[in-house]
Amino acid sequence: MSTTTHAIAAPGPGAPLEQTTIQRRDLRPDDVLIDIAYAGICHSDIHQARGEWGEAIFPMVPGHEIAGTVAAVGSAVTDYRVGDRVGVGCMVDSCGECEYCRADTEQFCVKGNVQTYNGVGFDGENTYGGYSKQVVVRDAFVCGIPDGIGLDVAAPLLCAGITTYSPLRQWGAGPGKKVAVVGLGGLGHMAVKLAAAMGAEVTVLSQSLKKQEDGKRLGATEYYATADETTFDVLRGRFDLILNTVSAQIPVDAYLGLLRVGGAMVNVGAPGEPLSYNAFSLIAGNKALAGSMIGGIAETQEMLNFCAEHGIGSDIETISAADVNTAYERVAASDVRYRFVIDTATIGA
Ligand code: NAP
Ligand code: ZN
């Protein structure tokens, strides 16, 4: 038993996305039915729809930056009511029992978290994401979107927001800390806003100076072009923390040279190709090279509350269903300021 909803799907790896219909399950006692208002386009959607991360499930309905309102709730749901403003990020289920789930880090569930799309639920059914008009999600994987953040500018917080908030918190971004953000795209622009709001001194390292004015407006005090080799001399030994949001390979050693002794470089960018580094780039300076994967549900709610307190949303360009393939091309070409958000009213219209 299920209901039909309109969606946008990639029929196969690299194929243009097209409109289709999919089935959403009938509500279980702990399910929430969400009328999706907006869905952000994350570069991870593009990596997966193009098969850049290896095997994937097609047809694929991408979308893990979901914002909307509650349309119905299952009989056991107590946290949400019809009409509530809610969001869903990159996961829709986990075992709830392992040490990582119990520590509010469901993304590391030992049984594997169930991805919002390109995943398989514990019921054996494929998951379909947010480029659609409705979605059914277990209540424990739904977050409340505080009043004061528009649903359109909130949608990207569910992935780009939490993926940058979590490592900035873990690695101590705050007053007296010099933080560099590499790549000013969807994740990067959120990292700049969040790190600045946390009180850190923020520098953007972008391929060129084209977006310099934006970077400063978003909260950076300095902005450098990585295509200019002198940048790597000028900034040598400067940063406590470097957050790499680049969706492609970068010369890791060059960036490690920009860390202070004891500094850390954290990768959230997830290119399909390996990154490599020289061991001495870490040894000479007790430096750390780390990774970070989204964030747990409790931390996602904390991030949303932080954004509401600080008046932070994503800088978006709202598009219609017909523009999704063009938007993919533009993101792949680093031509996004700074997140495309699909108005789901245009899906199936
Ligand atoms: P995005 O909007 O495309 O931003 C990436 C930015 O990286 C671009 O805007 C560009 O910034 C820079 N860049 C792109 N190609 C480059 C190249 N060849 N060399 C140097 N810089 C380049 O992508 P996004 O949505 O922010 O996602 C970024 C990455 O994070 C993706 O790989 C995505 O899959 C990954 N991701 C990881 C997680 C996680 O949990 N770890 C979660 C979400 C996304 P400039 O124009 O400023 O140089
Ligand atoms: Zn994402």
Image: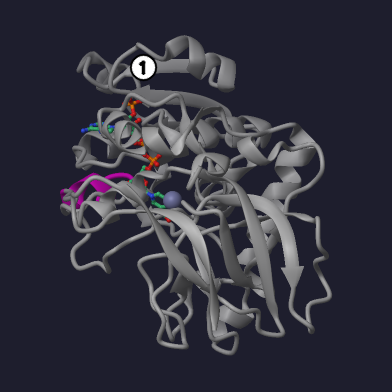
Residue at image position (53%, 50%) is 65
Is residue 284 on the magenta stretch? yes
* Position above or below: 105 against 326: below
Task: Give the amino acid type for the residue marked by disc 1 in the picture.
Answer: Tyr
Residue at image position (74%, 38%) is 149
Q: Position of residue 265 (x, y in %)?
A: 38, 45
* Position above or below: 335 against 105: above
Q: Judging from the image, what secondary structure is the residue with disc 1 in?
A: strand
119 or 111: which is nearer to us? 119
Ligand 1: image quarter = top left
Is residue 85 on the magenta stretch? no
Residue at image position (62%, 29%) is 196
35 left or right, relative to 163: right
Q: In which quarter of the image is residue 205?
A: top left
Which region shows up in magenta? 278-285
Q: In which quarter of the image is the N terminus?
A: bottom right
Q: Quadrant of residue 55?
A: bottom left
Residue behind mark 1: 224
Disc 1 under 8 Å from ligand 1? The reply is no
Could one spot residue 287 in this view of the protein?
Answer: no
Rendering colour mode: one colour
* Position above or below: 274 against 338: below
201 or 95: which is nearer to us? 95
Residue at image position (62%, 35%) is 153
Q: Where is residue 26 in the image (x, y as percent from the top left)?
A: 61, 79
Could one spot residue 306 in this view of the protein?
Answer: yes
